Image: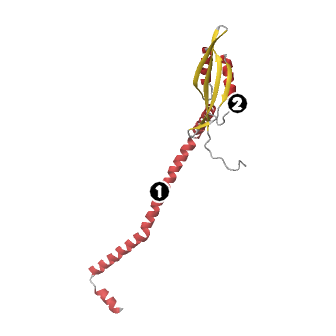
Amino acid sequence: MEQFLDRILKVRWEIKLAVLAGALAALTGGTYFFFISDLQDDIGRQDAQIKRLEDELIQKQSIANNLPEYRRQKEILEQRLAEALTELPNDANIDELLTQLNEVGVRAGLDLTSIEPGAEAKEGSFYSKIPVKLSVVGNYGEIASFFDSVGRLKRIVNISEISLKEPTKKGDKIVLKADCLATTFRFIDQKPHKAGGAK
């Protein structure tokens, strides 16, 4: 051991300085590798989390500041949905439609001689159509007024396959028999129904 210490003491100071510098460099590198780089990685993760939380806070503050506007827009959308469901209801409501067609026909001055609802048929992915065969008797103006009034109903009703025939004189006017197809539509709810019914 003494010999080892004697050798170290006899080494030139440049070599001692070089060894000391190397030892310090190794110590500094080890400290950086084992401690500082881990701390920097941890700081980077914490900074990213802080940034994410700040962004979330800004977004939620914006929503909170605009909450009355969002509520107003929600009310408008709910009102539009209610109007849309009047035009394209969830239920067939054929009895109600037949009553409306009869009332419109009477107001137009027509005689409804036949109303025959057909079978509902699915069309596309979100609606089905329901045909109703109609036969009415009246003059040309009354029939045109009837078709116009049907087109103004809140519920969507398309008139097609119009056939005017059998013109006859009735009093001082010419009356016709008009056969047509009135087609209405129903919205198909896409929500899955739970098995076993509601509890």
Which labelled disc corresponds to residue 189?
Answer: none
Amino acid beneath label 2 = Asp
**Nearer the observer, 9 or 194:** 194
**Nearer the observer, 44 or 153:** 153
- Residue sitting at 64 percent across and 29 percent down? 132
Crowdedness of circle 2 by 10 Å Cα count: few (<14), some, many (20+)? few
Give the quarter of the figure containing the N terminus.
bottom left
Which labelled disc corresponds to residue 95?
Answer: 2
Residue denoted by label 1: 48
**Residue 33's x, y, as percent?**
40, 70
**In the figure, is residue 18 to the left or right of 101?**
left
Identify the secondary structure beneath mark 1.
helix
**Residue 116's x, y, as percent?**
67, 28
Distance from disc 1 to disc 2, alpha carbons, whole Å, reads 63 Å
- Residue sitting at 28 percent across and 80 percent down? 15
Give the vertical position of 180 relative to 36 (above or below): above
**In the figure, is residue 11 to the left or right of 123?**
left
Badge 1 or badge 2: first in the primary sequence: 1
